[in-house]
Each structure stands twice: as structure tokens, then as C-alpha cells.
Amino acid sequence: MLLLTKNKITFEKEDKPQILTVLQNFGISIQLDIEDEIYTIKKINKRKYNDAPPYQREDKATLSWRQGIINTILQDGKFPCDIFLRRVKDKLYEFEIVDGGHRIRTLAMFVTEVFTLPKKYNIEINNVMYKCGGLFFSQCPFEVQQHILSFTWTTQIFTSDDHAAAKLFKLINDGNEMSAQEERQAINTKLANTIRELARGLSDINNQHDIFKDELIDFKRGNMDWDDALAKCALFESKTNCKSIIKKELDKFYTNTDYWKELSFEDSFKYNLNDITEILKYKDTDKVLKNDFVNLYLFVSTIRRHDYTIDDYGKFATQWFIDETNRKKPEKSLDIGGGKKMSFCTYQYLSAKVGGTQIDERVNLIWNDWDMKSYGCVKNEVVYA
């Protein structure tokens, strides 16, 4: 249940800054030559606003949506509250943008000449009609520029912990409860940041792993499923004897900030992901859903733990998908009463129903099909000094 009580979140007095001030806090330098009526605008490194807190979603706004935001401002349109800012104690920023990030980025993009107004666009300001079709911000009449930058946005500032901020974000955007993975990703730890960047590349798209960038898998990113799958794989990699990769164990994994300090598994985790990338390039029409991806990771990691290296990715992929097809075939029928029967598959049961808490059984079932030669693997040679 979503509860934002006074002891979890404290709101300050509402503010109404001009868009010019908002953009300056976002790292946009804006200088006005009053005599010539010319704005000089450029990006700077220093800014007060962080627009990529852990719970934020990717900015996938379309050009027409961004143009609509500019039009709304020029038409004096208002939202009930334009921006929600969380006050934070951070070396780089003073505030997190909880809501309004898309709008602020859109304004920053427009004033720095990233996109134009629609091709056929006229706007009336103070009973004067201005033709602005297809114009960048710097090409617009000074009155239009001034109207945008002097426009005020209602801003609400508050203080809270990470989870309360994430819950407020969720409430403002869609009103639904946060998924378990969304709750975990709200935690600001190295693990959460690493998983988030590998899955979605929020702070830098170049950080996103090729598995997800090239969509080599067949399950979507909704409800942070990419993050959830990666988190389960990372938890398995962090322990030599992993018994569970779900629920409380996964929660503890996220909240224990010492994990990445105590255990050196980040390199092997990413190495295995790179192996999986090469394998999935050969998947052809085979589907790789969330549980399939996790199973493949468990298998690849186990192979490395047994001191084998994948030498032929094409051969590995071919054998993996053959074995996957066979493992997914029902092996018996169960009588469920009323004269009805239900097909039962141990592999599907371990993967989807109880597999998160029966890791040994899950891995062993896959390992039973293992053969070094058919999987294109080689044994690592131990070199003694």
C-alpha cells in the first residue's frame, strides 16, 4: 500500500520560479544583451538539478510531444504542479527532479537548438501574431523568446528518504504500486546503479549492455524486468553456494552496501554477460524469455566455475537451444481431479514456480545435459610456476 506520511516526506512552501531560473539550475547559462535584445545561451557543467535519480524512467519523448510542451508554454498552459524537487545532500547536486524532468529537458533542448517549432506555427502574444514555423529558439522573435523564459512554473520542494521519493514519483506518474524491483532500484548503492546502467543506461546510454541495447532477448523492459533478471544473475554470481535469487535474498543483496566491497564478482559478472551476448547472436528464431535468460546465465557461470571456456559460440548456441527445447517438453501428466489431467514439466516448474529458491536443482537439471565437445567448450589449462 502506498503511504506517504508526514514522518516520511516533508513539503516546503510552494515556489514559482521563471523558466529562465529553472534552466540555469539545470546547467544552462543564459545571458541577455538588453540593448540588442539578444540572448546568449550555452551549456555549463555546474548545475543544481539531478534529472536521473534511480527511480526515473528513460526519456523517450517524441518530437511532437516536445513541441507540444513549448506550445503549452506559449499558450500560457498550466499543470497543477509543474516540477517536484527533492532536496538532497549531494556533492554534485542540491535537488533531484522527481517529476518534471521531461519538461525541463525539453526546454533545455529547445533553447540550445536541438529541435524547432512545427513547420506551420504561429503564436499570438499580447495581441500580436508571430510567425515561428520551423524556427529554432534563437530564430524566434525576441518577444517569443522572452515569453518562454519569463514563464513561471509551479515548483514543489520536499525532503524524504529514497523510497518515499520513488513512491511519490510512482504516484504522480501512474498511481500504481511499485514493483519489487522498482523498490530495490530506488536504493542508491553501487549495485543498484550498476544494474540500472547495464539494463537501461539511464545516466549514459553507452553504459547499457549490448544484450539489452540490441534487444537480443525476447522479454520487455516493463516493470524493470531487465533490471530484475540482471539482479538475479548478479546475486547468483556473488555467492559460490547460492540457494535463492528472489524476494528476501534479493532485497538483502540490494541493501547490503558491502557486497561490492567484500566480493570481487563484478568482473566475472560482466564477463559472463559478454559471453551470453555472443551466444545470443546465434539464436535465430528461438525465443529467450526472462527465465530462459536467467537459466542461460546460471549455466554459463557454472561452466566458468568448472574451469571451462566457450571456444565456439555458434556451436554452444545450437546445442543450448536443442537442449532447451527437450527440457521444456512435459514428461508426465498429473491427475487434477474431475477427470482432468495437467501436463507437468520439471524444468518449467523449477524455472517459473519454485526455481528462485531451488537453485541447485535448477542448475543440476541443466548441467545434466552438459557435454564439453557438443557445447564447443575447452578446459582451461592450469599453468604452474
Image: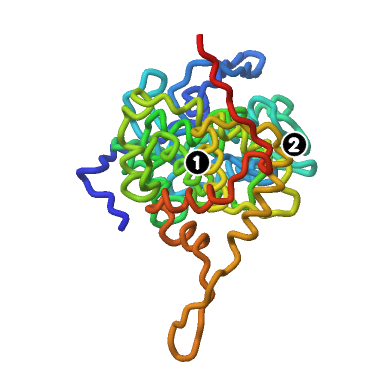
Q: Residue, x 58% and y 26% (percent of image)?
A: 380
Q: Give the side of residue 5 with respect to residue 307, left or right.
A: left
Residue with the mark numbered 1: 230
Q: Establish if 368 lies above or below 196.
A: below
Residue 313 lies, in percent from the top left, at: 70, 37
Characterize the local packing of mark 2: few (<14), some (14-19) or many (20 or more) Cα atoms within 10 angstroms: many
**Residue 249 visible in image:** yes
Query: In the image as oriented, which residue stretches furthest toward the left?
Result: 7
Q: Establish if 256 lies above or below 215.
A: above
Residue 31 picture quarter:
top right
Residue 59 picture quarter:
top right
Query: In the image as oriented, which residue stretches furthest toward the front?
Result: 384
Characterize the local packing of mark 1: few (<14), some (14-19) or many (20 or more) Cα atoms within 10 angstroms: many
Q: Residue, x 33% and y 45% (percent of image)?
A: 249
Measure how far apart labels 1 and 2 are at the Cα level: 47 Å
Q: Establish if 318 lies above or below 240.
A: below
**Residue nearest the observer in this picture, 107 or 358:** 358
Q: Residue, x 50% and y 41% (percent of image)?
A: 230
Query: In the image as oriented, which residue stretches furthest toward the bottom?
Result: 338
